Amino acid sequence: MESTAEQYSDQGWWVSWYGDPPSNTRERILFAAFCEVHQRGFQAASIQDIINGAGCTKGALYHYFASKDEIGLALLDEVFTRYIDSTFIAPLRDVDDPITMLTEHLLQSGGQMQEEDVALGCPLDHFAEEMAPIGAAFQERIQALYQSKRDALAAAFRRGQAAGNVKTDIAPESIALFFQATLQGCMGLAKNARSLETLMQCGECLLHYLEQLRPRDCPASRQPDDR
């Protein structure tokens, strides 16, 4: 039987959240769990399906993870955190032109999107909607991960203000919160409509909003035909 890693090796955006292909049993278990949870939800995902997807034995799974909840927390602590840090927080860490960086990030992500990505939604948001209300351990980790994104955004906007690339009459923390909420809303609307076009339309409006945060005559401004 084809393993989960082999089955999804050529997929697009949502599978890219996992990072490098799994190279050992524990990584195969986590990847199989990630795929099962994102497609079916954490509560609906079964241990047996994860075992089948990982191509391992039940004993091997329980050697690494004592329970299904432990697998879910590992997804948050390792898979989701690794993706958010490597693709979002780390690129923002030293930039003083966050508007350009965020524009490139949105365009790159949009270019990877497929209809399945829209139908399933953002892996982190999908997981958070289901699990944050259920257990304190999940809620605390999810909140911390969202907060780390906002902190990185706010710090980048402050550096942008100091460099003259972001208007100084805005509050970085508020703009970071608004950006995160808008992006999550775009993904949620598109998921509900099962419409890639809806996501692209909403994303273009977010790009336009980001440009309005630049000071007048800022040389880094995005041209109208930049896509």
Image (cartoon, rainbow, N blue to C red):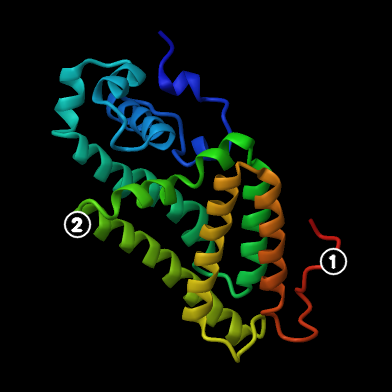
Q: Residue furthest right?
A: 225
Identified at 19% across, 57% down, the residue is 136
Q: In the rendered view, would you say 200 is above or below 158?
A: above
SS at circle 1 = loop
Crowding at label 2, few (<14), some or many (≥20) Cα neighbours within 10 Å? few
Task: Tell me the quadrant of the picture where the C terminus can be found.
Answer: bottom right
Q: In the rendered view, would you say 139 is above or below 25?
A: below
Identified at 36% across, 27% down, the residue is 32
* Amino acid identity at mark 1: Pro
Residue bearing the label numbered 2: 136
Residue 44 drawn at (x, y percent):
31, 32
Quadrant of the rendered image containing residue 144 = bottom left
Identified at 44% across, 69% down, the residue is 150
**Circle number at residue 187:** none
Q: Is residue 215 left or right of residue 126?
A: right
Residue bearing the label numbered 1: 224
Question: Could you tell which of marks 1 and 2 lies nearer the N-terminus?
Answer: 2
Q: Residue furthest bottom?
A: 169
Quadrant of the rendered image containing residue 142 = bottom left
| Nearest to viewer (mark 1 / mark 2) | 2
Q: Is residue 46 left or right of residue 222?
A: left
